[in-house]
Amino acid sequence: MYELRGTTKQYRRGKKTVDALAGIDLTIADGDRLVIQGPTGGGKSTLLQMLGGLDRPTSGSVELDGTDLAGLSESRLTKVRSENIGFVFQSFNLIPTLTAQENVETALVPLKVKARERRERAAAALESVGLAERLGHLPAELSGGQQQRVAIARALVKQPKVLLADEPTGNLDESMRDEIMDVLDTMWKEHGLTFVMVTHDSSIAGKAPRVATLRKGRITVKENVNS
Protein backbone atom coordinates (compact mmCIF):
# COMPACT_ATOMS: atom_id res chain seq x y z
CA MET A 1 0.00 0.00 0.00
CA TYR A 2 1.12 3.53 -0.80
CA GLU A 3 0.53 6.35 1.66
CA LEU A 4 1.43 9.90 0.62
CA ARG A 5 1.08 12.58 3.25
CA GLY A 6 1.71 16.27 2.61
CA THR A 7 3.93 15.40 -0.33
CA THR A 8 5.37 18.46 -2.03
CA LYS A 9 7.90 18.88 -4.82
CA GLN A 10 9.32 22.28 -5.67
CA TYR A 11 11.51 23.29 -8.58
CA ARG A 12 13.39 26.47 -9.26
CA ARG A 13 12.47 28.12 -12.57
CA GLY A 14 14.63 31.18 -12.90
CA LYS A 15 13.89 33.28 -9.83
CA LYS A 16 10.56 31.57 -9.20
CA THR A 17 9.75 28.50 -7.13
CA VAL A 18 7.25 26.20 -8.85
CA ASP A 19 5.13 23.72 -6.90
CA ALA A 20 4.95 20.57 -9.05
CA LEU A 21 3.20 18.86 -6.13
CA ALA A 22 1.49 21.02 -3.53
CA GLY A 23 0.80 18.93 -0.44
CA ILE A 24 -0.53 15.65 -1.89
CA ASP A 25 -2.46 13.27 0.36
CA LEU A 26 -3.14 9.96 -1.38
CA THR A 27 -3.71 6.30 -0.50
CA ILE A 28 -3.29 3.54 -3.09
CA ALA A 29 -4.31 0.11 -1.82
CA ASP A 30 -2.65 -3.15 -2.81
CA GLY A 31 -4.09 -4.34 -6.11
CA ASP A 32 -5.58 -0.93 -6.91
CA ARG A 33 -5.69 0.44 -10.44
CA LEU A 34 -5.37 4.21 -10.56
CA VAL A 35 -5.22 6.45 -13.62
CA ILE A 36 -3.67 9.91 -13.26
CA GLN A 37 -4.87 12.68 -15.58
CA GLY A 38 -4.50 16.43 -15.84
CA PRO A 39 -3.09 19.23 -18.00
CA THR A 40 0.53 19.31 -19.11
CA GLY A 41 2.69 20.60 -16.29
CA GLY A 42 0.12 19.70 -13.65
CA GLY A 43 2.41 17.29 -11.80
CA LYS A 44 1.40 13.89 -13.23
CA SER A 45 4.84 12.58 -14.13
CA THR A 46 6.31 14.10 -10.98
CA LEU A 47 3.84 12.12 -8.87
CA LEU A 48 4.67 8.92 -10.76
CA GLN A 49 8.38 9.52 -10.17
CA MET A 50 7.70 9.88 -6.44
CA LEU A 51 5.79 6.59 -6.40
CA GLY A 52 8.66 4.91 -8.21
CA GLY A 53 11.40 6.31 -6.02
CA LEU A 54 12.92 8.06 -9.03
CA ASP A 55 12.75 11.43 -7.27
CA ARG A 56 12.41 12.61 -3.70
CA PRO A 57 9.85 15.08 -2.33
CA THR A 58 10.83 18.48 -1.06
CA SER A 59 8.72 17.74 2.02
CA GLY A 60 6.19 15.18 3.18
CA SER A 61 6.37 11.39 2.88
CA VAL A 62 5.93 8.68 0.26
CA GLU A 63 5.45 5.36 2.01
CA LEU A 64 5.35 1.96 0.33
CA ASP A 65 4.30 -0.80 2.74
CA GLY A 66 5.23 1.38 5.68
CA THR A 67 8.67 2.39 4.39
CA ASP A 68 9.20 6.05 3.56
CA LEU A 69 10.97 6.00 0.19
CA ALA A 70 12.17 9.56 0.70
CA GLY A 71 14.16 8.51 3.77
CA LEU A 72 16.06 5.61 2.18
CA SER A 73 19.68 5.74 1.11
CA GLU A 74 20.25 5.64 -2.65
CA SER A 75 21.44 2.01 -2.47
CA ARG A 76 18.37 0.86 -0.52
CA LEU A 77 16.09 2.84 -2.82
CA THR A 78 17.67 1.17 -5.85
CA LYS A 79 17.05 -2.22 -4.23
CA VAL A 80 13.38 -1.40 -3.60
CA ARG A 81 12.94 -0.33 -7.23
CA SER A 82 14.73 -3.39 -8.56
CA GLU A 83 12.68 -5.83 -6.51
CA ASN A 84 9.25 -4.25 -6.19
CA ILE A 85 8.52 -1.73 -8.94
CA GLY A 86 8.16 -2.22 -12.68
CA PHE A 87 8.20 0.76 -15.07
CA VAL A 88 6.71 1.22 -18.54
CA PHE A 89 7.37 4.45 -20.45
CA GLN A 90 5.98 6.09 -23.55
CA SER A 91 9.30 5.83 -25.39
CA PHE A 92 9.81 2.08 -24.66
CA ASN A 93 13.44 2.66 -23.49
CA LEU A 94 14.72 -0.55 -25.09
CA ILE A 95 18.44 -1.03 -25.71
CA PRO A 96 18.74 -1.04 -29.52
CA THR A 97 21.67 -3.46 -29.69
CA LEU A 98 19.98 -6.13 -27.55
CA THR A 99 17.36 -8.63 -28.68
CA ALA A 100 13.88 -8.67 -27.17
CA GLN A 101 14.90 -11.48 -24.84
CA GLU A 102 18.12 -9.76 -23.81
CA ASN A 103 16.25 -6.51 -23.13
CA VAL A 104 13.88 -8.36 -20.79
CA GLU A 105 16.77 -10.11 -19.08
CA THR A 106 18.30 -6.76 -18.09
CA ALA A 107 15.63 -6.38 -15.39
CA LEU A 108 16.89 -9.54 -13.68
CA VAL A 109 20.60 -8.68 -13.63
CA PRO A 110 20.37 -6.44 -10.50
CA LEU A 111 18.56 -9.27 -8.73
CA LYS A 112 21.56 -11.57 -9.34
CA VAL A 113 19.43 -14.14 -11.16
CA LYS A 114 21.65 -16.74 -12.85
CA ALA A 115 21.98 -16.65 -16.64
CA ARG A 116 19.98 -19.79 -17.39
CA GLU A 117 17.08 -18.71 -15.18
CA ARG A 118 17.21 -15.21 -16.69
CA ARG A 119 16.81 -16.66 -20.18
CA GLU A 120 13.95 -18.92 -19.11
CA ARG A 121 12.06 -16.20 -17.27
CA ALA A 122 12.56 -13.67 -20.07
CA ALA A 123 11.26 -16.14 -22.65
CA ALA A 124 8.22 -16.89 -20.49
CA ALA A 125 7.52 -13.19 -19.96
CA LEU A 126 7.67 -12.51 -23.69
CA GLU A 127 5.38 -15.45 -24.36
CA SER A 128 2.88 -14.03 -21.85
CA VAL A 129 2.63 -10.81 -23.90
CA GLY A 130 2.32 -12.64 -27.22
CA LEU A 131 5.92 -12.40 -28.44
CA ALA A 132 7.09 -15.99 -28.21
CA GLU A 133 8.18 -15.85 -31.86
CA ARG A 134 10.16 -12.61 -31.48
CA LEU A 135 12.75 -13.48 -28.83
CA GLY A 136 15.73 -12.91 -31.10
CA HIS A 137 14.51 -9.73 -32.79
CA LEU A 138 16.14 -6.35 -32.22
CA PRO A 139 13.89 -3.39 -31.34
CA ALA A 140 14.30 -1.94 -34.85
CA GLU A 141 12.81 -5.17 -36.25
CA LEU A 142 9.66 -4.79 -34.14
CA SER A 143 6.61 -2.56 -34.52
CA GLY A 144 5.85 0.10 -31.93
CA GLY A 145 3.23 -2.10 -30.32
CA GLN A 146 5.64 -5.04 -30.18
CA GLN A 147 8.33 -2.85 -28.64
CA GLN A 148 5.92 -1.78 -25.93
CA ARG A 149 5.07 -5.43 -25.28
CA VAL A 150 8.78 -6.08 -24.77
CA ALA A 151 8.88 -3.17 -22.33
CA ILE A 152 5.90 -4.61 -20.44
CA ALA A 153 7.57 -8.03 -20.30
CA ARG A 154 10.73 -6.39 -18.96
CA ALA A 155 8.73 -4.60 -16.26
CA LEU A 156 6.95 -7.77 -15.16
CA VAL A 157 9.67 -10.42 -15.47
CA LYS A 158 10.97 -9.60 -11.99
CA GLN A 159 7.49 -10.20 -10.55
CA PRO A 160 7.08 -6.75 -9.00
CA LYS A 161 4.42 -5.65 -6.56
CA VAL A 162 3.81 -2.36 -8.38
CA LEU A 163 3.54 -1.43 -12.07
CA LEU A 164 3.94 2.25 -12.97
CA ALA A 165 3.20 3.37 -16.54
CA ASP A 166 3.80 6.85 -17.95
CA GLU A 167 1.76 7.40 -21.14
CA PRO A 168 2.36 3.78 -22.27
CA THR A 169 0.13 4.20 -25.35
CA GLY A 170 1.21 7.75 -26.21
CA ASN A 171 3.30 6.69 -29.24
CA LEU A 172 0.76 4.21 -30.61
CA ASP A 173 -2.21 4.44 -32.96
CA GLU A 174 -5.72 3.63 -31.73
CA SER A 175 -5.68 -0.07 -32.60
CA MET A 176 -2.27 -0.58 -30.98
CA ARG A 177 -3.43 1.46 -27.97
CA ASP A 178 -6.30 -0.95 -27.40
CA GLU A 179 -4.03 -3.99 -27.76
CA ILE A 180 -1.51 -2.65 -25.26
CA MET A 181 -4.26 -1.75 -22.78
CA ASP A 182 -5.65 -5.28 -23.10
CA VAL A 183 -2.18 -6.64 -22.26
CA LEU A 184 -1.77 -4.29 -19.29
CA ASP A 185 -5.25 -5.07 -17.96
CA THR A 186 -4.59 -8.80 -18.24
CA MET A 187 -1.26 -8.50 -16.44
CA TRP A 188 -2.84 -6.39 -13.69
CA LYS A 189 -5.54 -8.99 -13.07
CA GLU A 190 -3.36 -12.10 -13.39
CA HIS A 191 -0.51 -10.82 -11.21
CA GLY A 192 -2.53 -8.88 -8.63
CA LEU A 193 -0.47 -5.77 -9.28
CA THR A 194 -0.89 -2.31 -7.89
CA PHE A 195 -1.16 -0.46 -11.22
CA VAL A 196 -0.77 3.31 -11.56
CA MET A 197 -0.82 4.92 -15.00
CA VAL A 198 -0.48 8.46 -16.33
CA THR A 199 -2.46 9.11 -19.51
CA HIS A 200 -4.02 11.94 -21.49
CA ASP A 201 -6.46 9.47 -23.07
CA SER A 202 -9.94 9.92 -21.59
CA SER A 203 -11.16 6.64 -23.10
CA ILE A 204 -8.56 4.80 -21.00
CA ALA A 205 -9.39 6.79 -17.88
CA GLY A 206 -13.06 5.99 -18.35
CA LYS A 207 -12.38 2.29 -17.78
CA ALA A 208 -10.29 2.68 -14.62
CA PRO A 209 -11.78 2.07 -11.16
CA ARG A 210 -10.22 5.27 -9.80
CA VAL A 211 -9.11 8.44 -11.53
CA ALA A 212 -6.87 11.08 -9.97
CA THR A 213 -6.77 14.53 -11.54
CA LEU A 214 -3.76 16.76 -10.96
CA ARG A 215 -3.95 20.48 -11.62
CA LYS A 216 -1.27 22.90 -10.49
CA GLY A 217 0.12 20.29 -8.13
CA ARG A 218 -3.18 19.59 -6.36
CA ILE A 219 -5.06 16.32 -6.55
CA THR A 220 -8.65 15.13 -6.58
CA VAL A 221 -9.58 11.46 -6.73
CA LYS A 222 -12.89 10.03 -7.93
CA GLU A 223 -14.30 6.54 -8.08
CA ASN A 224 -15.38 5.58 -11.60
CA VAL A 225 -18.83 4.00 -11.45
CA ASN A 226 -18.63 3.01 -15.13
CA SER A 227 -15.49 0.90 -14.86
Image: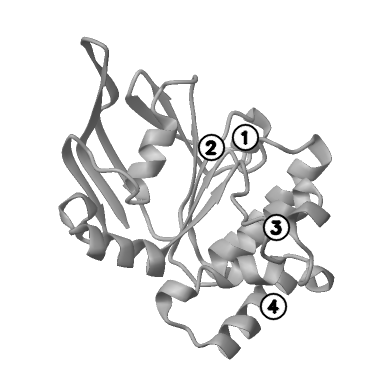
Quarter of the picture holding the C terminus: top right
What is the spatial separation of the Cα atoms under label 2 and label 4, in whole angstroms? Answer: 36 Å
Question: What is the quadrant of the N terminus in the image?
Answer: bottom left
Question: Looking at the image, do the residues carrying marks 3 and 4 touch, with CB atoms under 8 Å apart?
Answer: no
Say the numbered circle drawn on residue 224.
Answer: 2
Upstream in the sequence, badge 2 or badge 4? 4
Image location of residue 171, percent across then percent down:
70, 36
Amino acid bearing label 4? Ala
- At which x and y percent is residue 213? 44, 27
Residue 123 numbered tag = 4
Q: Can residue 182 be seen in this view?
A: no
The residue at the point 54 percent across, 69 percent down is 106
Q: Name the residue under label 1.
A: 206
Residue 149 tag number: 3
The CA span between labels 2 and 1 is 7 Å
Name the amino acid type tagged 3. Arg
**Residue furthest top as drawn:** 15
Q: Which residue is drawn at 74% across and 73% down?
A: 127
Mark 2 residue crowding within 10 angstroms, few (<14) / some (14–19) / many (20+): few
Label 3 to label 1, Cα distance in Å? 23 Å
Label 4 element class: helix
Q: Horizontal placement of 17 versus 171: left or right?
A: left
The numbered dot on residue 82 is: none
Do residues under tags 2 and 1 come within 8 Å of each other at their CB atoms?
yes
Amino acid under disc 2: Asn
